[in-house]
Image: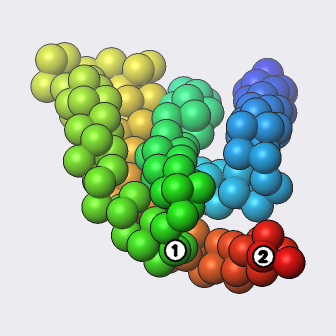
């Protein structure tokens, strides 16, 4: 039991280290403190999918499932990065925040869905046990598949309004300062 607790503690530290490292990298890339937080908001969305998937498939939250959650944290942020990058590019070109948000949501939905679906399709047979069940890798794949499904759908519906709300006032202030 002590070994299991030690492993779970190590995974938690690794997860927190990974999220912190992602925040620093994203903060440097976007030159913002808030936009990386918007992107990292997809991680709890993904964990919601993991919990739902484990409940539906009657799998326990095990040590191997936690490995899947750590891997999923990195995979889940990709859709939000694509959306926010597209919207930021349009803002730099002079679009309003509303139009940039709508443009990013409309133009990036297919690439986001295709990217997520290829990952889901690749892990689906392992998650469902169609090609043979694995007690070790099955829960990892189940966590990734369910987490990615839920986080992708929620990202497409949550990130654009969050971006619009958060950037609306910030962009207006920047524009006024540039005019002065």
Which residue: 29% across, 54% down? 107
Residue 61 visible in the shown view: no
In this picture the colour scheme is rainbow
Q: Nearer the viewer, mark 2 or mark 1?
A: 2
Q: Position of residue 88 (x, y in %)?
A: 57, 55
Q: Position of residue 150 (x, y in %)?
A: 38, 56
Q: Is there a contact, CB below 8 Å, between mark 2 and mark 1? A: no
Which residue: 57% across, 69% down? 163
Residue 174 visible in the shown view: yes
Q: Which quadrant holds residue 2?
A: top right
Query: Relative to 61, does residue 103 appear above or below in the rendering?
Result: below
Front residue of this view, candidates 178 and 169:
178
Q: Position of residue 67 (x, y in %)?
A: 58, 28
Which residue: 49% across, 67% down? 95
Front residue of this view, candidates 125 and 134:
125
Q: In which quadrant will I find the N terminus?
A: top right
Query: Relative to 75, does residue 59 appear above or below in the rendering?
Result: below
Front residue of this view, candidates 91 and 109:
91
Q: Pick whichever of labels 2 and 1 is earlier in the sequence.
A: 1
Q: Which quadrant holds residue 27?
A: top right
Residue 21 numbered tag: none
Query: Relative to 96, does residue 140 appear above or below in the rendering?
Result: above
Q: Position of residue 127 (x, y in %)?
A: 29, 31
Q: Is residue 26 left or right of residue 148?
A: right
Q: Is residue 82 left or right of residue 19?
A: left
Residue 96 numbered tag: 1
Q: Is residue 71 left or right of residue 119?
A: right
Q: In which quadrant will I find the C terminus?
A: bottom right
Residue 179 numbered tag: 2
**Label 2: element kind:** helix
**Label 1: element kind:** loop
Q: Is residue 132 left or right of residue 81?
A: left
């Amino acid at each position: 039991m002590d070994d299991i607790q030690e492993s779970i503690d190590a995974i938690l530290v690794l997860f927190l280290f990974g999220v912190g490292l992602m925040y620093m990298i994203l903060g440097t890339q976007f030159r913002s403190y808030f936009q990386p937080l918007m992107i990292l908001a997809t991680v709890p969305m993904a964990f919601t999918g993991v919990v739902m998937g484990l409940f539906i498939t009657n799998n326990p939250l095990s040590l191997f499932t936690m490995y899947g959650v750590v891997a999923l944290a990195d995979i889940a942020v990709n859709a939000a990065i694509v959306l926010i990058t597209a919207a930021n590019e349009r803002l730099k070109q002079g679009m309003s925040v509303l139009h940039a948000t709508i443009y990013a949501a409309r133009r990036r939905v297919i690439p986001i869905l295709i990217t997520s679906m290829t990952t889901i399709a690749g892990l689906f047979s392992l998650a469902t046990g169609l090609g043979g069940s694995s007690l070790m890798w099955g829960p990892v794949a189940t966590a990734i598949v369910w987490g990615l499904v839920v986080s992708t759908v929620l990202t497409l519906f949550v990130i654009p309004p969050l971006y619009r709300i958060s950037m609306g006032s910030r962009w207006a202030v920047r524009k006024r300062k540039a005019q002065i």
